[in-house]
Structures are given as C-alpha cells and as structure tokens.
Amino acid sequence: MAEQPSRNPIAPLLESLGTDHLDPGYAEAAARTRAAPDGPGRPGRSRRTLVLLVVGCLVAGLILGIAAWRTDSNAPRAENTRAALLDDIQAAQERQSQLALSATQLAEQLRASQSAAGAAGPVAEVTALENQGQLTPVTGPGLRITLDQPSAGQGPAQGQDRSVILDRDLQLLVNDLWASGAEAVAIGGVRLNTRSAIRQAGGAILVDNRPVFWPLSVEAIGDPSAMQVKFISTPSYGRFSSFAQLYGIEFDRSAVESLSLPGGTAPDLLHAQPATTAASPEPTG
C-alpha cells in the first residue's frame, strides 16, 4: 500500500490569505454591529448627530446673517438721524443769530426815533449805559486768540476724554484779558458782559448758555501792543503755553487792525427802583 504524502499545515492559511480579504474576526464583529439596534457610537446615531449638527450650524448662520443685515440696514438710518439733528442745531443757531441781529437793528431804530423826537439827553445817557454794559456792537483794533483741543494721538491717554481746555481755563483767560486792557471781549462770537457765565457741559463749552465750538476764537478789542505786553505776563498765558507744549493744543495769538464784536444779551430785570441818596449826617459839635 502506497504511503500518502503528508499535507503541509501552512497551506490552508496561505489559501485563506489569498481568498479571504477580511479577517474572520472583523467580519463577525461587523455582522454583530449590523444586527444590533442603534445606540451610542452606532452608524444610525452618528448620522442623526451629523444631521443635528448641520441643522444647528444652519440656524446659527441664519441668526448671525439676520443680525448682520439688521446692523447694516440700521447704520444708514442712524447716520441720517444724526445728520438731521446736526442740521436742526445749525438752523436753530442761525435763527438765533438772525434774531439777535434783528434785535440790535430795532434797538438802533428806536434810539434814532427817540433822538428825532428831541430826547437826545436821555438817549445819550441810555447809550452810555448800554456801552458800559457791553450791550451795543463795537468795532476796533485788538487781539484774536485761537484755541483748540489736542488732535487724536495727543493729549491724555488713549481712550480718555481729550478735553484739556476747561471752562475754568477760559474764565482765567478772559479775566486776564480784561486786566490787560481789553474794552470788549467775545468768545466764539458771543459777547461777554458783566453777567456772562462760562460753563462746561461734557466736552462742550457754554457761554451765556450758548454752545461755542472748537476751534475757539477769543477776540478782545483794545490797544493790541499794550495788551500783548501785559498779557504775556499773566497766569493764563503761562498755563496755555504749558498746555501747548505738553498736550499739543492750539494756542495762537495775533494782532488785528479791525475787529467787529456783536452786542451782548440784555439782562432780564425783574425789579427796579430809583436809587435814593442817603442824607448827609449833621456835624456834631
């Protein structure tokens, strides 16, 4: 009896590698996964998670798009509102200037009519009092001082208010101009009188409750040479010179041959009575 050749034990493994491209263990695990219900980490659950994630991204993108659209659509409206408010302010200021000019012209016509009626004496006295009260327009030589806050990148630290020139600085400047020989002073076209007030509201300066804007022009009528000599030795000159060096404010001075200042606002007098002369005491022996 012929002896059968022994079979090589490695042959089945080699045949399996040639015919089966997937390990049996992996194939069995894949079959169990397909047969098991959906759960965490299963393909069905992954698909639902992916769908929810896509829907969430779409909703978030839609919300952001609507917000951006509303912001862009509101920007022109806000700009138009701001421009309209600025136009209203400018129109109101022009109207106020026209009314002030009309009041000055009417006052001049009134004085002319009174003079024609033969009341030269009282009218002359009233005119002199109005001149002393800074209520009539004046023209003459003088000084013009131009002031402005520092530009961007100068002055206080970034993010803070750039206001360097405050109301008290302007008050000191005006008082020094009076002391230097000024006969009439106006700030931003607003004439000062004995009852005028210079106040600050935020970054704005109010002169007799009227806003004035930067750059600010301070005009003083008087002898330019004499005023300049006295003014450079005043505390306000030193203060504004320091501001110009430290913070970069504008502080320019110039002599002007002819300045025209408007009349000041007449005060509202509620009560008036004639002044009485006190009787002289009798001498005692």
Image: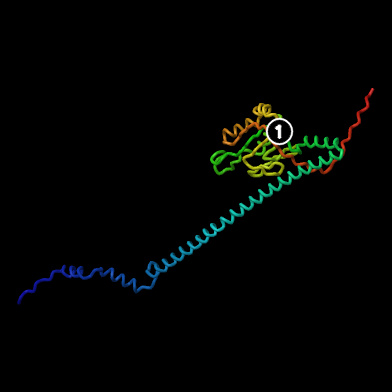
How many labels sit on residues?
1
Q: Nearer the viewer, residue 111 or 67?
A: 111
Q: Nearer the viewer, residue 4 or 197?
A: 197
Count residues near mark 1 (Cα–Cα under 10 Å), then give few for <14, some for 14-19, many for 20+.
some
Give the farthest residue toward the left.
1
The secondary element bearing badge 1 is classed as strand
User: Could you say where residue 163 lies in the image, as x and y percent from the top left?
Assistant: 61, 40
Give the farthest residue toward the top.
285
Tell me the quadrant of the picture where the N terminus can be found.
Answer: bottom left
Give the farthest residue toward the front.
116
User: Could you say where residue 156 lies in the image, as x and y percent from the top left?
Assistant: 57, 39
Q: How is the model colour-coded? A: rainbow
Q: Quadrant of residue 211?
A: top right
Tell me the quadrant of the picture where the C terminus can be found.
Answer: top right
Q: Is residue 162 above or below residue 282?
A: below
Q: Is residue 82 left or right of residue 33?
A: right
**Residue 179 shows in the view:** no
Q: Is residue 178 left or right of residue 78?
A: right
Give the residue type at disc 1: Gly
Q: Is residue 253 left or right of residue 25?
A: right
Q: Is residue 55 above or below residue 193?
A: below
Which residue is labeled 1 in the image? 140
